[in-house]
Image (cartoon, grey):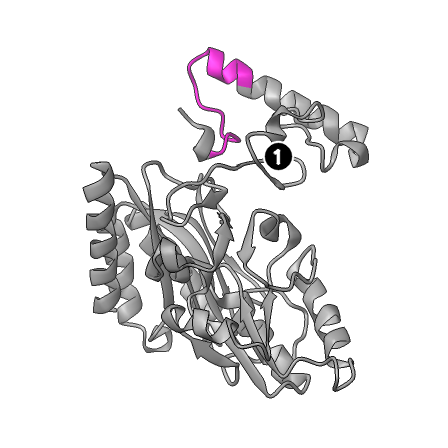
Amino acid sequence: MTDHIVEMKQMLAKVRQTTNEDGFVVAALYKFADLPDYREIQTVIQQLCNDASALGTILLAKEGINGTICAPETGMKSILEWLACEPRFEEISLKFSFTTEQAFLRMKVRLKNEIVTMGVPQINPAQQTGIYVDANEWNRLIADPDVMVVDTRNTYETAIGMFKGAVDPRTKNFRDFPAWALALAKQGDNKRPKKLAMYCTGGIRCEKASALMQDLGFDEVYHLKGGILKYLEDVPDDASKWTGECFVFDGRVAVDHDLQPGSYSMCYACRMPLSQIEMTHPDFEDGISCHHCRSTQNPVRTMRFAERQKQIRMAKERGKQHLGVPHHKQK
């Protein structure tokens, strides 16, 4: 874990050289591990994060830990030191980025049946997964014509960025992925891919998906270690096979190739990322709807969102911050 602390400090030093700003460290973390005592760990981690002034969400289940938190540098260091003392979190996946503002509103440590919900209970990534591929080896792998590159994320994520040539399963959530995978597995030998290279935001979904693909009979299954975020951190822009921005699950909405907050906002109703041009569409109403969801909006829900926006506006006029305003919109 000392290496992770060094990595965090190096990232912050690099950021300060280019921005001259102090701020917060965002850490995306996960580890598939056998945690039969995950309920007891909940209160310990909640107190740890409270003491470190960390906000975000951490999920705990029998299969491991998963989450994204945002904290001042000293607070993040104390969290990493605690993780280093837990043997079951050895080699935990950690990706760091930086933001000048706190990215979350509150700190939640939740108990779940799965740390990433796929709905296939026989899959156990703590016991068996595909082959890890480091970010600096990824370009060589996906250049192989026998490799099918698969994006295991959802449509609202793939809409703003993907690896060149990747297949998009068009899933609305990760529970949809097993049906797509089964259909791929049932294809004849002449259509069935010889090798699979899978990726996602931070590595957790593609790792679990790789275990599923092995269960379905695929022999050569690879997944990007650390996900897109690690790739963007390690691979220079001029050598990158990534196009667009990367959706992240916090107030930044997306990050660019330098892991800085990107250019997208988000529709409050349907959670789709929106470009600056899309926000000028006639169907866009801030906090209420966008062109993706306007036609399917429930009138009662629309009225509720409109009332929420009214409360936000009134709070702003009083010089106060409404709790529902995402941090990327706070000024």
* Residue drawn at the location 35% of the way across and 36% of the way down: 101
- The foreground one among 96 and 118 is 96
Q: Quadrant of residue 308?
A: top right
Q: Is residue 141 visible?
A: yes
Can you give x and y, in whole percent of width and height, for residue 91 in the image? Answer: 34, 74
Q: Which residue is mark 1?
A: 268
When the figure is inspected, residue 291 is found, relative to residue 202, above or below; the finding is above
Count of picture labels: 1
**155 or 303: nearer the eye?**
155
Q: Quadrant of residue 311?
A: top right
The image quarter containing residue 198 is bottom right
Dot 1: element: loop
Q: Percent position (x, y) of residue 127?
A: 51, 85
The percent position of residue 286, horizontal first and vertical second, equals 61, 25
Looking at the picture, which amino acid does disc 1 mark? Answer: Tyr
Q: Is residue 318 above or below residue 217?
A: above
Residue bounds of the magenta highlight? 313-326
